[in-house]
Amino acid sequence: MRNKFLVILSIIMQFLAVGTAMAQNNKIKIPDIPGFYTLKGDFHMHTVFSDGHVWPTFRVNEALRDGMDVIAITEHMDYEGFPEEIERDYNKSYEIALEAASKKGLMVIRGVEISPRVPPYHHNAIFLEDANSFPMGYMENTHKQFVMKDSLTREQLMAPFLEAKKQDAFVSYNHPSFKWWDKKDTLLFTDFHHELLEKGILKGVEVVNSGRYNIIAHRMAMKYNLTLLCNTDEHYDMYPRYADTHRPMTLVFAKEKSIAGIKEAMEAKRTALYFGDYLVARKKEALALFNSSVSFNAVKQDRGGEPIVVVTIKNKSDLLFNIQIKSKFDIEEFPLGQLELGANEEKKLILKAVWKYPETTYLNITVGNFLVSPDEALNLDLELPILEE
C-alpha cells in the first residue's frame, strides 16, 4: 500500500509541476513549406510503464504546453520499472495518452523501444498495431533491472525486428555510440544493421538525443540514406532541462495533418531537426524552410548624395539564424557580412560603393547554424531586384 501511495503522490506532484510550467509560453512558431505542413514531433519518450518516472498524461500535458503536433511514447519492451505496482502492458501508456490527447489537437503514435545491450543496440519501432506482441527471448529478467541471457542467438535478437516488419513499423536506430556500449565495439553500424537495412526494416536514425547532436549518427544518416530524427528520450519531468529553451523536436513536413501523413513524410525522409539554436536537414528541406522563414527585399536609396542599396531581411518565424552574407558591394556595419537574425526580427543591410544602380543584386548566403551535412552549412545564392524607394 505504501508503494502505491508514493506512486499516486508522485503523479499529483507531477501535475502541479506541469501546471506551473504551463504558465510559460514555450510554443514555437515555425512556418509551413510549399506543399507541406510543418509538424512538430517527439518520437522517443518513456513513462512509469517502463523506466520513466511520470504518468502518460504528463507527457501529453508537456506536449500541449510546448505546442507539439505529435508524440510517440516508446516504452522499453524489455524493462519494467515498477513491476509490483504496474502490470506489464506496453500498450497501456499509449492508450492513456491517446485518451488524454483526445480532441486537444495532439496526435499520439503507438511505439516501443527494442533495447538489447549488444548489437544491434537500441531501436524504436513506431506506428504499431500491438506493442505487447514483440518477443524478447534474449531477456533473463526485466523486473527493475535489465539482465540478458548468457547465451544469445541471432534469431532471438532479430525476432522483435521481424515483428516490427510484420506490423509495417517505422524502425529507427537510437543514440548510436551511447555511453554504456562496449568500448571495444567501435563498429557502430554492424552487420546486423546492414541486414536490417537490406530487409527494409531500418529506416531512420536518431541524430539528436536529449538535445545532444551526434555527428556519428548524422554521417550514418547520409551514408545509408536514413531519415533524420531528433527526440528528447525523456524519462523525468521535461521542464527543468528545457526551462530556458525549447525542447528538441523533429520537424515533419507532411502532406496532411494525420498519423498517415506523418508516416508517409518520415518514410520519404522529409524531416528537419531543431535543438537549441541549431537546425539540421537535407538541403531540399533546409532551403524550403529557410525560404519560408526569411524574406529579402532590396531598395535604392540616396543618402545625402551617396547611392546605397538597403536590403531588408525579415524573419517570419521563431527560429534564430546565424547568417553570413557576401556581396560584390561593400557591406556596412556587419563585419564579414555576419549577422544574427533573431525570432521575428527585421534587420537592414546597407550595400555601399554602389555608384551606379544595377537592376538586380546578388547575395551569397551561408546559414551557419543550419547544417545540411555533418560538414556543411546551408548555402544559397539570391538574385534580388532593386526596387525604387
Image (spheres, rainbow, N blue to C red):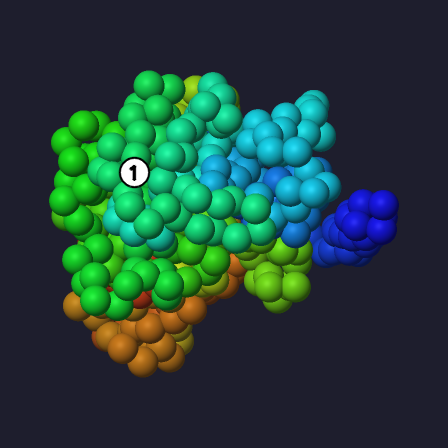
Question: What residue do we see at 30% from left, 73% from top?
Answer: 337
Where, by quadrant of the figure, is residue 292 drawn? top left
Q: Quadrant of the N terminus?
A: top right
- In the image, residue 195 lies at what x, y percent? 16, 36
In-image side of 267 versus 51 (left or right): left
Residue 12 falls left or right of residue 254 = right
Image coordinates of residue 205 in percent, x first then y, are 31, 45
Front-lying residue, 199 or 357: 199
In this rendered view, identify the residue nearer to me: 351 or 379.
379
Q: Which residue is located at x 14 percent, y 31 percent? A: 198
For the question of whether residue 382 can be seen, the reply is: no
Q: Position of residue 376 (x, y in %)?
A: 20, 61
Q: Residue at x 37, y 35 (%)?
A: 137
- Picture residue at 62% right of the left edge, 40% below the top: 49
* Residue 276 visible: yes
Q: Which residue is mark 1?
A: 157
The image quadrant where one finds the C terminus is bottom left
Q: Is residue 174 left or right of residue 99?
A: left
Please state which of residues 34 and 332 is positioned toward the viewer in this rendering: 34
User: Considering depth in this image, is 283 or 386 the residue closer to the camera?
Assistant: 283
Q: In the rendered image of this protein, does residue 181 appear above or below residue 198?
A: below
Element at label 1: helix
For badge 1, the amino acid type reads Leu
Q: Residue furthest front?
A: 150
For residue 132, above or below residue 50: above
